[in-house]
Amino acid sequence: MISLAKTASWTRRARWLALAAAAALLVSACGGGGSDNAADDCEPGETDGDLAFYNWADYMDEELLLAFEEETGVSIDYTVYESNEQMLSQVESEAAIYDLVVPSDYMVALMIEEDLLLPLNYDALPNFSNIDDAWDNPPFDPEHRYHAAYQWGTTGIGMTYDALDAIGGESSWAVIFDADTAAQVPGGISMLDDAPEAVSAALKYLGYSITETIESGNEDAIREAGALLKATNDRLVKYDSVTYGDDLVNGEVDVAHGWSGGFAQAFFETDAYETHVYTIPVEGGVRWVDTMAIPHNADNVCSAHAMINFLLDAENGAALTNYTYYGSPNEASTPYILDEILEDPGIYPPPDVYERLELIPQMGDLGLIVQDMLTEAKS
Amino acid sequence: MPSLRRAKPAAAQSTDAGPDTPPSLTPAELAAQRRKRRTGTLIATPGALYLLIFFVVPLGLITVYSFATRTSTGRTSLSGWNLNSYERIADDVIGGIIARSAWLAFLTTVLCLVVAYPFAYYLATRPPRLRARLLVLVMIPFWTNGLVRIFAIRFLLGSNGPASALSEAMGFGTFRILFTPTAVVLGMVYGFLTFMVLPLYVALERMDWRLVEAARDLYASGAKAFWRVTVPLTRSGIVAGCVLVFVPSFGSYVVPEILGGAKTLLIGSYVARQFQAARNWPLGAALSVLVIVAMLVAVAINQRNSANAERTQGVTR
């Protein structure tokens, strides 16, 4: 009997041990990381280990990565995401540790607010002065401590010239939001599957300023935009934030709400410039800037600075734009950028058009209402 | 009346009923039995640990999160516990999304059943060698990447695809089926058909065909014999197939995203949206809990159904 009891207690103990081991495993999995963020000590070009670079999909010329690896001897662990929020949840949950990420404007503001970014050490970034003064101290990072501009672009409408002619030759959000105008277009229409963008487009059509609406907390205007989206839903072929350019050149749709560079890439790849065009509607549109920033828990801060400095180099910055077809904030790059890009009003809009573009501000609590608007539109 | 099969062995031992009752064991035999049991536990440990870490713990976390609060920047604050997220499920919008998901899942299930039953019937009535080959054919799509297959359907249904070209050639004009709920149902029927075919096949194959013959001998028409004998006898397969199709269709994410053009919002996409774009983890978690509960109910129905089936089969044999 005694021996029996002993075995029983042994198995119980073994079970507890197993549980404890499992718990330890969990804890170590959750609590990983912990690094000394000694950004102040980085010299220009200095590296301190392999670089974990987390960037938007289809947003980097691989030649540049290879060149950086060759120049510095560190290897790059390059992974991609498809939305700011996806990147944010990775950084926030520490599901993986990144040294360099590429948040858009409003996301920079949010990440600063959440203490998720590390201030940059400008001493390690001599090429920072290459950035055009127009990008100094933007509203999303007023003291300009946390980010370096990467690429910028606009949100507007891509369409066939036939569709543009059908609506009278001038691009307007009416081609999406006004039933009669939309009916003139022979083919289908698509919109970005992105609540802030969809609501901003509707606001622009309704004549509201995006910045003022958000900053003054004008919920009525947002609900009005939401009602407009709902009325538009049945007219759309689809919502898409990834293949809108391809769908347009393939003829799946004739009018697509989307980002400038996405269209430019699709037009370029299929030689569709003769038949298709990217436009900024007469009511105005959205402009945005993606930036390079370092997460608060980055392991290799110096390597991240080295990469930022590398990409801010005049020729490297031009190579980036020549690949992505998005605008470069890098003033020094201009001589090296392809003429077809510099002369494309869809990528570098003329000043009068540029004035009608707005940044989407950080939305705070309105963000959820904006999300609900797109959800309700789809119901 | 509970079946004997389900009675606890301990109870059977203590009541000391029939000649099957094992004689009392010697200490050595007892020890051997214990060793055996311990080896069993040991073998099961990796699997159990895996499930504990990757299923039970995340499930617990999801449940905890569903009672948490979302801050204005979208961070989940693990304090101020509340039921707000569950209250929102009753909203018209979310209720509508749930109802639509259930309706499309129901349509998918019915279509799968209608397509799969004759097919399984055909399979089960072939000679064994041919049957084995046909079964392999049924399984082959399973070995192909699901995403690739869905994109292939997207091409097939696209306005530049073969289906549209065919309808144009026949004078019906181009048709728009891609990015509609119809396309979603078509895709889900294709994706989940195997889940319906296999349980139906098993039920039909196990069936005692002499009962059908007996019905025919007693002047039942073919149709009557089918409805009164074959269908009731394969009920377990029908219910199992329906559960296996309905549950994944209800929570389906990939098919509606790719074939539905994100235009008809279904519960799977809506949950994903809460965790990503909307950054409302508490609501996403509450909806996940809801989907899991729905699944558990379906599984419970299935369990009960198979227990019933075992009992009826005990009677027929």
Image (tube, coloured by chain):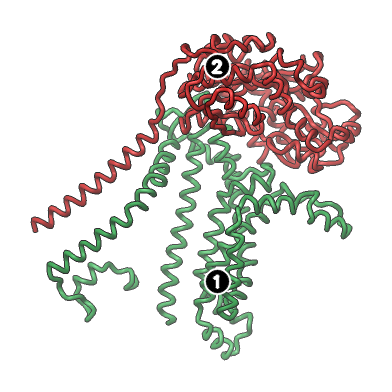
Chain colours: A red, B green
The residue that mark 1 highlights is B201
> Residue A290 has which mark?
none
Q: Give the x, y percent position of residue B152.
A: 70, 53
In which quadrant is the C terminus of chain B drawn?
bottom left
Residue A105 in sight? no
Residue B17 in sight? yes
Amino acid type of disc 2? Gly
Q: Give the x, y percent position of residue B227.
A: 59, 77
Taking the image as shown, residue B166 lies to the left or right of residue B298, namely right
The residue depicted at 57 percent of the width and 43 percent of the height is B95
Chain letter for the residue marked with disc 2 in the picture: A
Chain letter for the residue marked with disc 1 in the picture: B
The residue that mark 2 highlights is A45
Q: Residues within 10 Å of mark 2 (few under 14, many from 20)?
A: some
Closer to the camera: disc 1 or disc 2? 2
In which quadrant of the rendered view does residue A223 lie?
Answer: top right
Q: Give the x, y percent position of residue A158.
A: 79, 31
How far, Cα to Cα, is label 1 from label 2? 66 Å
Q: Residues within 10 Å of mark 1 (few under 14, many from 20)?
A: many
In which quadrant is the N terminus of chain B drawn?
bottom left
The residue depicted at 41 percent of the width and 79 percent of the height is B315
> Viewer-proximal residue, B6 or B170?
B170
Q: Please determine whether, in this image, residue B158 is positioned above or below residue B274.
A: below
Give the tally of numbered discs: 2
Q: Give the x, y percent position of residue A334.
A: 75, 16
